[in-house]
Amino acid sequence: MDNRPSYAHIRNAQARGVCPWCSHSTEGLTEDMCPECGNNVRALKPLGPRDPGSPGVASLCSLIAVALILIVAVVQQRVESAFAKQATPAAATSVELPSGQFELTAKAFVKIASISPDPAGKQQIGAQATGTLDAQAATPADKLRVAMVSAELEGDEKALARLDKLEAEPDLDAKLAEDSKTLRALYAGEPLTPEVQTRLEKNHGWIGKLAATHGKPDTDLARAPLIGGGGKLMALVFGAVAGIIIVFIAGFTCFIVALVKIAGRTLRPRFIPPTPGGSIAIEMVVVFVLGFLALKGLSLAAEHLLGPKGAVWFSLAAQWCLLFILLWPALRGWRGGLSALGWNKGQGVLTEIGCGLFGYLACLPLVLFGAIVSIILMLTYQAVQVAMGHKAPPAPDNPVFELASGKGGVWLIVVIYILASVWAPIMEESIFRGALYRHLRSHWPWFPAAAVSAIGFGLMHNYPLLMLGPVMSLGFGFALIREWRGSLIASMTAHCVHNAVVLAVVLFAVHLIGG
């Protein structure tokens, strides 16, 4: 991707003793920089003017940026988010409510199984359901909930066997032991009192509410809303699968077209790396990561003052303040700094948006590759843990499902959706593809620059470390779009489309699951 149309012009200008950029005479120059336009007159590839700042500051900021991003990665992996805490509020019980992902998984399997006319088919769905939930069951409370789902889909005997195993665990929580005893009575045909039903729902959410209707006909007024909607959900699954197949076919087509054009040198990059030595771009990255860490710290402090729910709203509002970091080039006296960082119209706004859509589709094979790598890594890690005699680690929770579960309220979903589809494309593209990629590109070819910027981009996200493959693949693809177009409009468009579509599909699926 470094083949550029102006090589011959540059060599010709160097042979004539003039600057390739402004034709100023280079006779007698002792430095590489043209005194007229500031470009590197001896570069064999076209380089833009050096960014303001000094090489020493750039080196120092590079080290600081690496250290800060690693600190953020540790914080993201180890510190529980305020959203997770407020989505699962503390109750007057030591039993923690199920995660949104766990509850949504149980809902989906129960609703799909309810439309199966074949008992054997329902049993098969039940086996899949309990296997999936077992992988997510991180606590004894979750294991009890798997038994409740097993009673619905596999029968009372298998549920009772699970209760036997759970009750054999040492130091079982007294409240869980009481719930287990209640379930045994229920599966033996004893009716539950309203107080006991309320306790099950309080301790176990939707799953406890479903368990309280066990044994009642599917048409019962309390049970029907809990198990209904399986037909719509299956229609969504088939529609989503068909849509994904179509989109990925389009993506592979765009990917092949891009490769053919690159090989034929008809798809030429418009990004021109700056001459090495400037520091403002990497300074901007440092300021952003410092601001991000400060926001994390303030959010943790806000939990003590405002409570978990208030801290979430504080964090979401404060996040918009990070947009002021875009003023950093102007504060450092760099006129046209934002334009150099990619805030320009390129070949026209509509053209850049169209290229962003094409680029996003062409990046989908990379995302698929990243997802496959993450799955292989996660399965390998689980196999190693089991081989070493440890318990297999539970499947990681996805923050998207915690959001989509709706436990934080509708307005929280709306605000986070806007953040994901507006704030993230603007801010993250400006920092990682605008500033960081520009700084790296001044020293390295496109591939290592794109790879390193993608790693930094991935580590800043609150996903399990082994599951960062798709995020890093997206970051790599967005960097290629930046290299291709020069302007950030295209990569912002691709980022916006990805976040908006994925969240919309998940939210619609959760709406259909309901219950």
Image (cartoon, grey):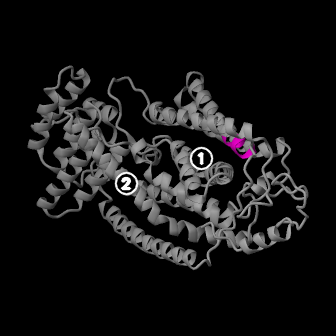
Residue labelled with disc 1: 415
Residue labelled with disc 2: 373
Work out whether 252 lies above or below 467.
below
Q: Is residue 231 left or right of residue 273?
A: left
**First to last magenta residue range:** 280-285
Q: Is residue 25 left or right of residue 493?
A: right
Which SS class for mark 1? helix
Work out whether 3 lies above or below 127.
below
* Res 493 visible: no
Quadrant assignment, res 156: top left
Circle nearer the N terminus (1, 2): 2
Q: Residue at x 65, y 54 (%)?
A: 441
Q: Residue at x 77, y 42 (%)?
A: 328
Which SS class for mark 2? helix
- Crowding near pointer 1: few (<14 within 10 Å), some, many (20+)? few
Magenta stretch prevailing secondary structure: helix
Q: Who is closer to the viewer here, 218 or 229?
A: 229
Callout 2 amino acid = Val
Nearest-to-viewer mark from 1 and 2 = 2
Work out whether 57 lies above or below 335.
above
Quadrant assignment, res 293: top right
* Res 285 visible: yes
Q: Who is closer to the viewer here, 363 or 446?
A: 446
Instruction: From the top left corner, tell me how far across and down residue 457 is, in percent.
Output: 55, 47
Instruction: From the top left corner, tell me how far across and down residue 126 is, in percent.
Output: 19, 52
Callout 1 amino acid = Val
Instruction: From the top left corner, tell me how far across and down residue 100 is, in percent.
Output: 39, 43
Q: Who is closer to the viewer here, 485 or 343?
A: 485
Quadrant assignment for the N terminus: bottom right
